[in-house]
Amino acid sequence: MTRLFLRSFFTIVLAVLFLPFPATAAPRQVTLFPDSARVTDVLAVPLQPAGNDRFRAVVILPGQAQPDTIRASLPVELPQRIIDQSWRQVVRQDDARLGDFRRQLQGVKAERISLFAAIQALEAQILFWQAQAKGKAKTLEETDAFSLLLSKSIKKAVQDKLTLEPQLLKAEERIKTLQEEINRITGQKENLWEVTFLFTGPAARELSLTLDYSLGGCGWAPLYRLDARPRSGVILFTWEADIWQSSGVDWKKVSVRLATLPPRPTLSPPPILPWIIRPRPSLISRARTMADMQAKAPDAGVMVASPSIDEPREIRQSTYALWQIGERDIDAGVRQRIKIRDESWPADFLHILRPSLTAQAFVQAGIRLTESKDIPPGQATFLMDGAILAKRPFSFAGREGAFFFGDDPLVIAESHLLSRKAGAKGFITDRQTQEWVWRYDIRNDRSDAIQVRVEDPLPQVRDERIKLLLNYDKDPSDNKDDMAVWILSVPPGGKVSLTSTVRLEAPAEMDLDLGWRR
């Protein structure tokens, strides 16, 4: 009997040891998009007989995987072929790190229940002793003794309650922290995908299978740093990638690439819409057509419309840039930064002044690079000489561009209205006049010379009977239709002034709208 039992036991053990277990996919190459990833993995899958010279292999994928995007392939030299694949959801089996977090969470939840119950019991005690305050003591001695007992009991219960309440708050905060950590690791997915592949061909113990699929719960975001250095004439540009993944499995030595936009998977080209040229229908016939379409619609609340020529634009595939990052370890639920570029861009710095609107001088950096850049939208930190100015969205494409770095408090443009005249009717025969004289003082309190660009709006004449006369003590560098522009150099600690005169003449009877610069 003992020999029979031992023989059966070892038979079961050997069967379990040689039973093919599901293979768990571990990424070898990952292309991260802003809110997803394309994963490639090569793994050895054990085969199980499936009857009729067919074999089966099972692979476990993360719960964030999109099984309908799976593309599986075998080495071309192998005689086996994939003839089918299917999938179903299974319960997640936690690894050591995730299991430890769950055990901690269960322990803290039990602690919270205990603390909550203790507080409730103390509150019941307090209510009990307060109710006893209406006791029926018969003598003064009994009243004093009962009052002392009541006071001590309530005091102790209140003190114990006040001691336990902060502990309850800490337990609740700890539960929240642990749950967030678990969610970051698993991507809030408690199930996995069990994918079954069916093969045909000669028998084999295992096959080398390549999987390519889309994965959610991961991505990357570009982070930029633009540090303007006017004295050196450069912008120090730093580009980092903030990357993350919550597949529930730590990625070890995975080849990482970053892409700007995810490609849209399509199996066939878009249909060509008919090009119809015909007379435009009248309003009555168009309304009748729309009414007929609504009547024929399967749902009375839904309008069925014919295809629009704008539809192909919604499904067209776009190109996207790739950056090869190299092999990295990316743990589930942990965000990390990877530096992509660290460059110095030559820049021409100008102070943009619009004294008719504000006394502030805004620093502009113009760049002209030797090679084109393709920098996707992201969050950027703007600095001036290492001091943080602001954080705002940033993107750039091409070789030339201009960026603003806020206002410079050491450069001020003051506007002074020196003269304002308006001629009354008959001042000039059948004419009226309007005249403004401004002086702009540009002061540079910096220790180095600066270049400024002064922009001044010009009145826009909308009637040929209105005559415009302009006069400046310094000729504009550029005189556009809507504004005059001066490019001036201001010495360190110095000041530059310019004066402008604007004179209008119009018929005396004309009611002029002088706009915002009255």
Image: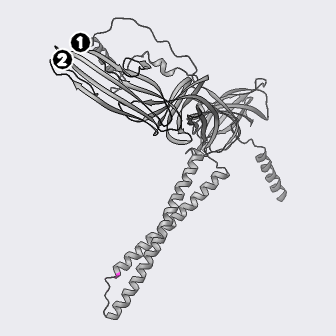
Magenta residues? Answer: 132-136
Q: Secondary structure at mark 2?
A: loop
Amino acid type, callout 2: Met
Asked whether the residues under the numbered discs 2 and 1 touch, taking CB atoms below 8 Å apart as contact, a structural biologist would say: yes
Query: Label 1, on which residue?
Result: 465
Residue 292 is drawn in which quadrant? top left
Amino acid type, callout 1: Arg
Query: Label 2, on which residue?
Result: 510
Pinpoint residue 424: horizontal percent, then vertical percent. Answer: 16, 22
- Does the magenta-highlighted stretch encompass residue 452? no
Nearer to us in this view, 61 or 349? 349
Nearer to us in this view, 259 or 208? 259
Q: Earlier in the sequence, mark 2 or mark 1?
A: 1
Residue under the point 32% across and 90% down:
137
What is the number of the mark on residue 84? none
Residue 329 is drawn in which quadrant? top right
Decide: is 125 above or below 431: below
Q: Secondary structure at mark 1?
A: loop
